[in-house]
Image (cartoon, grey):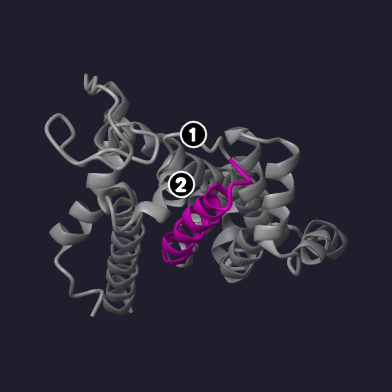
Amino acid sequence: MRARTPIAVSLVLVLVPLLVAVFGPFVPLDAEPGLPYERGPGHPLGTDGLGRDVLQLLLAGGRTALGMALGAVAIAYLVGGLIGLVAASTRHRWLDELLIRPLDVLLPLPSLLVISVVAVGWRASALAITLAVAAVNVPTVARLVRAAALDAASSPVVEALRMQRESWFGIHLGYVGRAVLGPVAADIGTRITLAVFLVASVNFLGLGLSPTAADWAVSVSRNREGLLLQPWAVLAPALLLVAFTLGFNLLADRLVHRTRRMAEVSR
């Protein structure tokens, strides 16, 4: 069903929150403060519990809500992906064990608890939360990439490339890297959704960014008591978060479906 979803729908779901997050802070919108949970002229989406314009907060809050999650996934794949490729390609079992076994110790740790502890220690630090989300994702990313790369890394093609004195990066980022694109594409949709959830959860619980920050999750947490008085203060940022994660998962599923079809045709 996901694979049959029109790609235009998936793109709209992803691009609208993404464009708001990237270009929203540059929109020249200078709304005057009003009364708490006010709906009226000058405030198209009303005001929040502090009397601030919801539309203005919406335009400014996406950069942290999505930027922290996307940055965390990028760091996790940069570190975990490299560890997985090295572990899959090495001919020394001790190096494989040295790289993977310490990560196995980190796998059972509850992600939200770890990130919450870091967030409390470095209060209101977007960088600390981003690195913490990346760190809890590195073990699973490394194991995924290693498992996906094992067959390709031990194939005769790699041996032939080694005999031709191809560089390590040329072999494993070129040939082996293409072999793991399918599993990685399938995982990225889930991984980004999880990262958005973790970042939003920490901010929603009040353990991350400042309670007065314009972040979408912080806005949902701060204004949930006034949901019946002024619903857009909660619904608008929540809808953008849901739209981005849903759209990204739909796009990732389409990519996986297309990759499988191409693999079946090539066989």
Residue visible at 29% across and 58% down?
228
Q: Quadrant of residue 260?
A: bottom left
Residue visible at 58% across and 35% down?
126
Query: Is residue 146 among the parts visible in the rendering?
Result: yes
Tell me whether circle 2 and circle 1 mark residues in contact (CB < 8 Å). yes
**Does the segment drawn in magenta span residue 45?**
no
* Location of residue 147 with respect to 83 vertically, above or below: below
Q: Amino acid at mark 1?
A: Thr
What segment is highlighted magenta in the picture?
Answer: 184-208
Q: In this figure, which residue is indicated by the disc labeled 2?
A: 222
**Does the segment drawn in magenta span residue 187?**
yes
Helix, strand or loop at label 1? It is loop
- Residue 148 drawn at (x, y percent): 56, 68
Q: Is 32 displayed left or right of 133 in the figure?
A: left
Residue visible at 34% across and 63% down?
252
* Location of residue 25 with respect to 7 vertically, above or below: above
Q: In this figure, which residue is indicated by the disc labeled 1?
A: 212
As drawn, the residue found furthest toward the front would be: 35
